[in-house]
Image (cartoon, rainbow, N blue to C red):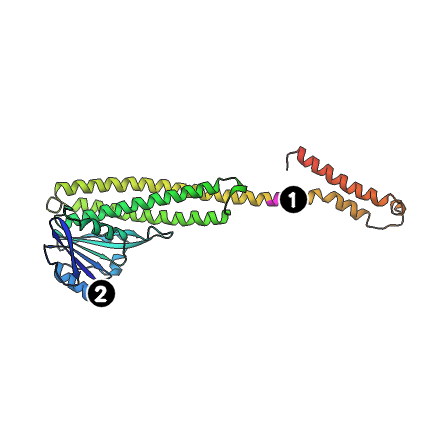
């Protein structure tokens, strides 16, 4: 689907689909959402440049994601989708800047696009051309990324409280906590991938956005975006370190609990070893054992067993092994 956006009084006017043109104002933004081959061909005719395929957008080489061709800038970044859920994902989005027009190619629905479109459709928003649309989209994507990192930080605080809470006060087991930390760690890794791709995009745009592409205000906004993405990169590194720390601490606590269980069984085995020895001796039933024929023999054996348990237990307490 191709959605074409025009400009009227600095605000976006959305017209429609495929090769229909906006009712008013110049077309400044061509948004290709899951385009078919025919729609790709239509967009290439309208823009005068090639549109990358889905496979080309998923290339990991920087030269395949950021390049200039036929006077147009091609910039692909990984953008978060479903960041409000427990399993945020990344989707490649290509921004094509052709003069003062912008084309975006995407195969998912990042919420940042809807948020920006809603804002930009308000009267007097202040858009001039597709370059302003590009910067506005990038600013919204960075804002959404920052919001996602705030949610991740809050989840880590919850996991931290769960890990370092006294054992009897834990609402869930350490296994569930490890699962939650691992899921959060995955979200941090995906956010880091998105930040790296956006940082490269900003540097590429700054290098190729001369005075003929961005005005002074646009270049200042790009500098601000670069500063913002740097601060997010530092923040995500701290979150990554916290994930590693919590995971190590949780695994350490699991090991301590296992050692405690093994220690309890070991202590019980040692405590009951003397009475077992006594019972084994008096269970041999040799005729030369006079205690077997005495009425006090059975109480004596029981007494020896109890005394051996008490002495062993007292020694363990005195040694502080319990």
Please state which of residues 28 and 246 is positioned toward the viewer in this rendering: 28
Q: Residue furthest top?
A: 318
In which image quadrant can residue 93 be found? bottom left
For the image, the number of numbered tags is 2
For residue 99, say whether it is visible: no
> Viewed as shown, does residue 248 lie left or right of 112?
right
Give me the residue at 29% from left, 46% from top: 145
Inspect the magenta stretch and tell me whether residue 9 lies in it: no
Identify residue for label 2: 36
Identify residue for label 1: 266
Question: Residue 92: image x %, image y %?
Answer: 27, 55
Please state which of residues 23 and 256 is positioned toward the viewer in this rendering: 23
> Viewed as shown, does residue 42 lie left or right of 312?
left
In which image quadrant can residue 239 be found? top left
Magenta residues?
261-267
Identify the mark nearer the N-term, 2 or 1. 2
Please state which of residues 155 and 265 is positioned toward the viewer in this rendering: 155
Q: Secondary structure at mark 2?
A: loop
> Viewed as shown, does residue 71 lie left or right of 77?
left
Q: CA–CA distance between discs 2 and 1?
A: 68 Å
Question: Residue 185: image x %, image y %?
Answer: 39, 47
> Which quadrant, please, contains the N terminus?
bottom left
């Amino acid at each position: 689907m191709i959605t074409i956006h025009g400009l009227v009084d600095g605000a976006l006017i959305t017209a429609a689909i495929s090769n229909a043109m906006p009712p008013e104002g110049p077309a400044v933004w061509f948004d290709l959402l899951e385009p078919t081959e025919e729609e790709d061909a239509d967009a290439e005719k309208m823009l005068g440049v090639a549109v990358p395929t889905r496979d080309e957008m998923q290339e990991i080489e920087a030269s395949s994601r950021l390049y200039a061709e036929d006077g147009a800038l091609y910039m692909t970044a990984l953008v978060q989708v479903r960041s409000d859920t427990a399993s945020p994902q990344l989707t490649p989005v290509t921004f094509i800047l052709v003069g003062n027009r912008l084309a975006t190619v995407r195969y998912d629905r990042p919420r940042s696009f809807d948020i920006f479109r809603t804002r930009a459709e308000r009267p007097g928003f202040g858009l001039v051309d597709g370059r302003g649309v590009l910067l506005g989209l990038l600013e919204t994507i960075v804002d959404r990324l920052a919001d996602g990192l705030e949610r991740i930080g809050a989840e880590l605080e919850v996991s931290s409280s769960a890990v370092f809470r006294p054992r009897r006060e834990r609402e869930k087991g350490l296994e569930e906590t490890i699962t939650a930390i691992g899921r959060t760690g995955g979200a941090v890794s995906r956010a880091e991938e998105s930040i790296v791709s956006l940082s490269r995009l900003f540097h590429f745009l700054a290098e190729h956005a001369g005075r003929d592409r961005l005005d002074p205000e646009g270049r200042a906004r790009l500098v601000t975006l670069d500063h913002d993405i740097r601060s997010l990169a530092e923040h995500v590194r701290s979150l990554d370190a916290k994930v590693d720390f919590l995971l190590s601490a949780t695994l350490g606590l699991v090991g301590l609990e296992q050692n405690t269980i093994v220690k309890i069984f070991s202590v019980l085995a040692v405590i009951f070893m003397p009475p077992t020895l006594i019972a084994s001796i008096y269970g041999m039933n040799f005729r030369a054992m006079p205690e077997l024929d005495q009425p006090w023999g059975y109480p004596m054996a029981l007494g020896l067993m109890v005394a051996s348990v008490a002495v062993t237990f007292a020694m363990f307490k005195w040694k502080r092994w319990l």
